[in-house]
């Protein structure tokens, strides 16, 4: 089997980190790139035998993740967020895939949890992103937010999902979207005026948010608010 490194960036990530790292025990190594946590993140990371901890001042999402990829010992890497958990089924699929890679990169579906419940409508599932790849053929964009892996080669999608504990509370959702809208601001008054209404209608009506109850309404409303912030800032 080809050796695998898992890369995780952290900052005050204690809430889910132990569960996240337990789901990574099958990997040959886990590189945790921390940007100055002052909670128990460091202690938790250091308690796992396959973790290499690196302190790195914040560079932006794209560059921070690329730093972890560059520091990994192995060319095949899986990039995981500190609120994402590799399920047993996904772990088995990754191990099987590592025996004989057929592509240079693999997309992985996510089950996103909002306020304690998995949301599978509103375009939030399968929400597949490129996470497993050969770093010789891939690199992260330098985006401060909404970074992505740029792959030179063929890709396919794994079938088993990982879990993503996206937002526990409405307050957390608002704070994160406010931060992201500042990092990715694209000032455009006309889009700030028109796009939020379209975002709400698309998510709540066209993509089935109405069937998710109050969570669907809140998600659609706050993504519409994020759209307004992004274009008005």
Image: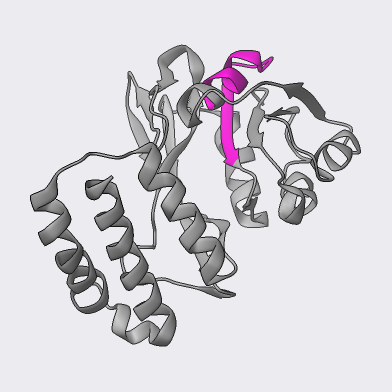
- Magenta range: 65-80
Q: Is residue 18 above or below residue 171?
A: above
Q: Position of residue 131 (x, y in %)?
A: 49, 36
Q: 106 and 51: which one is in front? A: 51
Can residue 54 be seen at all in this image of the molecule?
yes
How many labels, in total?
0
Q: Is residue 114 visible?
A: no
| Residue at screen point 14% across, 66% down | 198
Instruction: Classify 193 as above or below 217.
Output: above
Q: Residue at x 40, y 27 (%)?
A: 103
- The foreground one among 24 and 182 is 182
Residue 112 locus on image (x, y percent): 49, 63
Taking depth in this image into account, of 222 and 100 the one nearest to the observer is: 222
Residue 67 location (% of width, % of height) = 58, 18
Say whether residue 231 is magenta: no
35 w.r.t. 112: above or below: above
In the picture, which quadrant includes the C terminus?
A: top left
Residue 195 position within the rendered picture, expressed as x and y whole percent measured from the top left: 15, 59
From the viewer's perspective, is 104 left or right of 3?
Answer: left
Which residue is painted at 41% across and 36% down in the image? 145
Is 73 magenta? The answer is yes
Question: Which of the 4 image quadrants contains residue 70?
Answer: top right
How is colour applied across the structure in the image? Answer: one colour
Quadrant that contains the N terminus: top right
Residue 13 horizontal side relative to residue 90, left or right: right
> Vertical placement of 149 versus 38: above or below?
above
Residue 59 vs residue 25, the one in the foreground = 59
Name which residue lies at 46% across and 27% down: 62
């Amino acid at each position: 089997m080809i050796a695998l490194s898992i890369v995780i960036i952290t900052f005050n990530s204690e809430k889910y980190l132990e569960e996240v790292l337990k789901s990574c025990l099958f990997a040959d190594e886990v590189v945790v790139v921390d940007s100055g946590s002052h909670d128990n993140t460091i202690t938790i990371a250091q308690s796992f035998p396959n973790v290499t901890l690196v302190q790195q001042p914040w560079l932006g999402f794209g560059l921070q993740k690329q730093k972890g990829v560059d520091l990994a010992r192995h060319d095949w890497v899986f990039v995981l967020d500190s609120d994402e958990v590799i399920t047993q089924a996904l772990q088995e699929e990754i191990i099987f895939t590592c025996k004989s890679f057929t592509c240079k990169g693999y997309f992985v579906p996510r089950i996103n949890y909002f306020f304690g419940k998995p949301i599978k409508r509103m375009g939030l599932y399968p929400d597949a992103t490129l996470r497993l790849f050969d770093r010789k053929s891939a690199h992260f964009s330098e985006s401060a937010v909404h970074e992505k892996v740029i792959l030179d080669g063929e890709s396919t999608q794994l079938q088993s999902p990982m879990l993503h504990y996206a937002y526990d509370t409405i307050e957390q959702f608002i704070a994160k979207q406010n931060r992201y809208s500042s990092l990715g601001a694209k000032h455009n008054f006309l889009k700030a005026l028109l796009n939020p209404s379209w975002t709400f209608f698309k998510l709540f009506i066209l993509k089935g948010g109405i069937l998710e109850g109050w969570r669907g309404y809140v998600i659609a409303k706050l993504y519409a608010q994020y759209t307004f912030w992004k274009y008005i800032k």
